[in-house]
Amino acid sequence: MNLSSTARARIALAMTFVVALLLTIMPGPAWAEAFRPDWVGMVLIYWVMAAPQRVGVGTGWVLGFVLDVLQGAVLGSNALAKALIAFLTLKLHLKLRMFPRWQQAVAVLVLLLLNQLLVLWIRGFVGRAPETWVYWTPSIVGMLVWPWLFVVLRDLRRRHQIA
């Protein structure tokens, strides 16, 4: 069976989200859990920025909903947060693409913090808010990981001609 280049590109794109979801739910050492970046959020930001005609707010909502189910979170909290960061990235994607990588990392930090703030607000509303500053570390780690993730996904996008 020979797949067309468009089908291969769609599969490669979908696989990046599957890998991000797996990295999110994969167990790790207890001490490192607080430092796990928001893989789904970062991959979503990259693809909305790089291929806004293929990945958008709907994709963010679906990924967030899947994340809610996988993590047992308040249903819709991650969906709303991921849809919001997809929307903001979509509105700013032309500017974000022009930024040097360090400025993109700062923008990613802001988007991830907004994501966490919205989830925190919803969790607080239902009485499940975390009580430590460690809650915010995934956004900081995400900012530090962004330049390398960007390079990996850019190379994958070029190799599979995802546009």
Image (cartoon, helix red, strand yellow):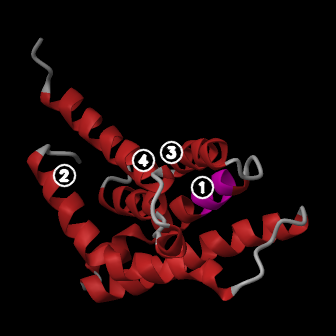
The spot of residue 3 in percent (x, y) is 14, 20
Is residue 67 shown above or below 154? above
Q: In the rendered structure, which disc, 4 or 1, sits on the residue that comes first in sequence?
A: 4
- Say what amino acid the circle numbered 3 marks: Thr
* Front one among 76 and 135: 135
Query: Which quadrant of the rendered structure holds the N terminus?
Result: top left
Chief SS of the magenta region: helix
Q: Where is mark 3, residue-wise?
A: 59
- Residue 153 screen position, x and y as percent: 23, 59
Mark 1 or mark 3: whose residue is earlier in sequence: 3
The image shows residue 136 at horizontal and vertical percentages of 60, 81
Q: Amino acid at mark 2?
A: Arg
Mark 2 → mark 3, Cα distance in angstroms = 17 Å
| Residue 83's disc number | 1
Q: Which residue is mark 2?
A: 157
Is label 2 in contact with label 3 (beta carbons under 8 Å)? Answer: no
As helix, strand or loop, the secondary structure at mark 4 comes to helix
Q: Horizontal placement of 44 versus 117: left or right?
A: left
- Which residue is denoted by mark 4 in the rendering? 22
Instruction: Using the numbered discs, state the Cα–Cα distance from disc 4 to disc 2 in whole angstroms.
Output: 20 Å
| Residue 51 relative to residue 126: left or right | left
What is the span of residues highlighted in magenta in the rendered image? 78-84
Query: Measuring 23% from the left and 73% from the top, which residue is drawn there?
Result: 148
Q: Is residue 95 above or below residue 2?
A: below
**Marks 3 and 4 in Cβ contact (< 8 Å):** no
